[in-house]
Amino acid sequence: METGSLGCGARRWANRIASGAPSNFKFLYDLELPIADKIRMIAQKIYGADDIELLPEAQHKVELYTKQGFGNLPICMAKTHLSLSHDPEKKGVPTGFIVPIRDIRASVGAGFLFPLVGTMPTIPGLPTRPCFYDIDLDPETEQVNGLF
């Protein structure tokens, strides 16, 4: 394989984006739909769910964000990558499940709402005990201990 040909598809794609070529992108749902309806549409059409269940905190956030004027923001689901459902043990293409939405958070600056599906953590990969607990400054030597 010729090394000059590696990434040529990526280059064409990047050049097209950089040129400002028109896009046919459209959301799965109308942004004017209520928050719960947008989440339901993603759960049903993408994940194959029967429905969603808004847990009390999520229901509160739907009302709050709608009242604050953020109801028309798009949705970015935060869920496990191990299954199309909320349950990482359900492999393949599960059916007949309800997607539990435990909370909804707003990334207003980025311009989207993100429902937390099931037990999905929002900062994966971090230890249960943050490393800063082990960092200290020795007042005599003025050396920082515990960084490495």
Image: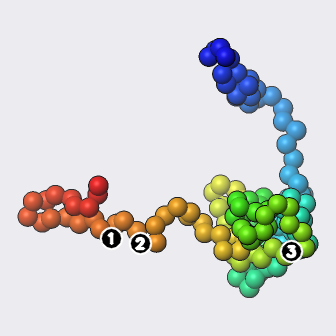
Nearest the camera: 144 or 82?
82
Q: Residue at x 70, y 56 (%)?
A: 111
Amino acid type, label 2: Arg
Q: For residue 40, what is the image quadrant?
A: bottom right
Identify residue for label 1: 133
Q: Quadrant of the C terminus?
A: bottom left
Residue farthest toward the bottom in the current orientation of the protein: 56
Q: Position of residue 20 (x, y in %)?
A: 76, 29
Amino acid type, label 3: Phe
Q: Position of residue 58 (x, y in %)?
A: 73, 78
Q: Which mark is residue 97?
A: 3
Q: Residue at x 90, y 60 (%)?
A: 45
Mark nearest the camera among 1 and 3 is 3
Q: Which mark is residue 129?
A: 2
For residue 120, above or below residue 53: above
Relative placement, left or right, of 144 versus 25 is left
Q: Quadrant of the N terminus?
A: top right
Q: Whole-Å distance between the Cαs marked 1 and 3?
A: 41 Å
Residue count near mark 3 (Cα–Cα under 10 Å), binned few <14, some 14–19, many ≥20: some
Q: Position of residue 112 (x, y in %)?
A: 71, 59
Q: Is residue 38 visible?
A: no
Q: Whole-Å distance between the Cαs marked 2 and 3?
A: 34 Å
Q: For residue 119, what is the image quadrant?
A: bottom right
Q: Is residue 132 visible?
A: yes
